[in-house]
Amino acid sequence: MPMVKAARSGRATVKATELLKRQHREVKGLFRTVEGTQGARERQRLLERIGEALKIHTAIEEKIFYPAIREIGTDKAEDLVLESLEEHHVVDLILAELPRVDPADERFEAKMTVLKELVEHHAEEEEEEMFPMAERKLGDEQLRELGEQMEARVESMKK
């Protein structure tokens, strides 16, 4: 199967599902790092990195990936997107509260645990249900086109 080349970089474009899985792994790694960190300043810095990573991730899902899933046109696709949007909303609520909690406070750890569990559940559901549906219904070419759009959006958000 031929690889689609990214126009600007000359490298092969990753499929949207693979890009999202990679972001899932990165965020899970940040959560593991927070769990092993005691210093309040370092925990705060890691929270900021998690928040930024999740902001970028949810933006590309909501603006690029989920609309493509909705176009599949099935009730299951619509249900998965609606549930995912609600999970993003809950993540946003927790992320808005966390900076106001002292990282040395026991509530910080409790909120981080809830956030971690929500994000892990969300990622697992996407990887087990939504992504296989996307692979079957959208195909490699469309997933690579979406991946290219998503990579471009990630780069623009990091500037």
Image (spheres, rainbow, N blue to C red):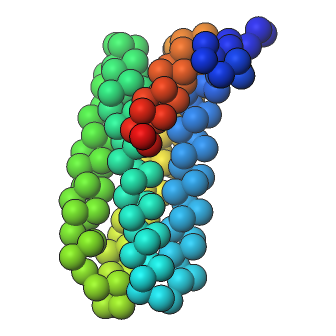
Is residue 25 rendered to the left or right of residue 153? right
98 over 55 or under it: above or below: below
94 over 158 or under it: above or below: below
Q: Nearer the viewer, residue 137 or 60?
A: 60
Q: Is residue 139 visible?
A: no
Res 106 quadrant in image = bottom left
Is residue 87 rendered to the left or right of residue 42? left
Q: Nearer the viewer, residue 108 or 136?
A: 108
Q: Residue at 44%, 78% (x, y): give it.
A: 43
Q: Is residue 40 visible?
A: yes
Q: Quadrant of the C terminus?
A: top left
Q: Residue at 40%, 14% (x, y): give it.
A: 72
Residue 157 coordinates in the image, percent (x, y): 39, 38
Residue sitting farthest toward the front: 159
Residue 4 coordinates in the image, percent (x, y): 68, 12
Q: Residue at 33%, 27% (x, y): give it.
A: 63
Q: Quadrant of the N terminus?
A: top right
Q: Residue at 53%, 83% (x, y): give it.
A: 37
Is residue 75 rendered to the left or right of residue 155? left
Residue sitting farthest toward the right: 1
Residue 71 coordinates in the image, percent (x, y): 36, 13
Residue 36 coordinates in the image, percent (x, y): 57, 82
Res 140 quadrant in image = top right
| Numbered marks: total | 0
58 over 143 or under it: above or below: below
